[in-house]
Amino acid sequence: MSRLKKKNIFDKFFENRDSLIIQYRNGDMTKREFLQLNFDFIQQMRVKPFSKIDSYEKGMYNYQYYNVLAKYYTMLGVDMKRQGKHYNYFKHHLNKAHYYYNEKDKSTLKLLRHLEFENVEAYFIKVESKRLKDKLYEIVLKDYEFAIFHSKSNWLLKILKEEGVFISGKKKSLIDGYINEKY
């Protein structure tokens, strides 16, 4: 009798992540729904980020963990502002979002260092947002499916340039529809 292999946290994480990406790409959910389902899943997993990045899987998990929290708290902050809630609520959520975005960028760098910047390409992307124009760039790990990161970090940009993986000019994002959809 054959036993089914028990799924580890990375199996569950990547299955969920890939499923949500495909559903979003197929138009089965909005960006807001995509973000909420990612947030719910991260909360349900109850797995904190890894302190040491010694595998692609750990690095991707950390990136996703922090990115999901950053976007979720940004979304809450914007909701507070739209609803006319007290400024302190809006600011509180935005401060949390900034913290998580910074942690996401640190995780990105740890993963890139683990991969020794091999088969990595980064470039500024074309965006509709005036706030993100000439600030948002894309980092693509060419050896992995759905391994596309984004950042506005100047310190990370400097390192990408020093490592010779940043291309001059602007390109259309590989996930342009997602990047330019508001939530």
Image: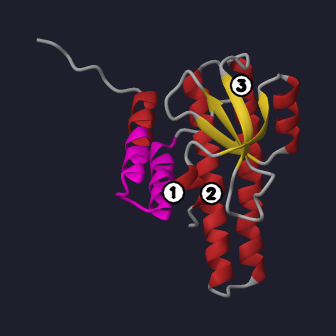
Q: In which quarter of the image is the C terminus?
A: bottom right
Give the numbered dot on residue 35: 1
Amino acid type assigned to the residue bearing label 1 in the image: Leu
Amino acid type assigned to the residue bearing label 3 in the image: Leu
Q: Residues within 10 Å of mark 1 (few under 14, many from 20)?
A: many
Give the numbered dot on residue 179: none
Most common SS among magenta residues: helix
- Percent of width and height locating residue 127: 68, 56
Segment colored magenta: 18-46
- Which is more N-terminal, label 2 or label 3? 2
Whether residue 60 is in magenta: the answer is no
Judging by the rendered image, the residue that carries numbered circle 2 is 71
Along the line of sight, which residue is nearer the eye, 49 or 107?
107
Secondary-structure class at tag 3: helix
- Could one spot residue 52 in this view of the protein? no
- Percent of width and height locating residue 32: 50, 64
Q: Quadrant of the N terminus?
A: top left
Which residue lies at the image location 77% right of the left edge and 46% below the top edge? 102
Amino acid type assigned to the residue bearing label 2 in the image: Lys
Whether residue 25 is in magenta: the answer is yes
Give the numbered dot on residue 112: 3
Q: Residue furthest left?
A: 1
Contact check, label 2 and label 1, Cβ < 8 Å:
yes
Contact check, label 3 and label 1, Cβ < 8 Å:
no
- Which is more N-terminal, label 1 or label 3? 1
- Percent of width and height locating residue 73: 64, 62
Secondary-structure class at tag 2: helix
Q: Residues within 10 Å of mark 3 (few under 14, many from 20)?
A: many
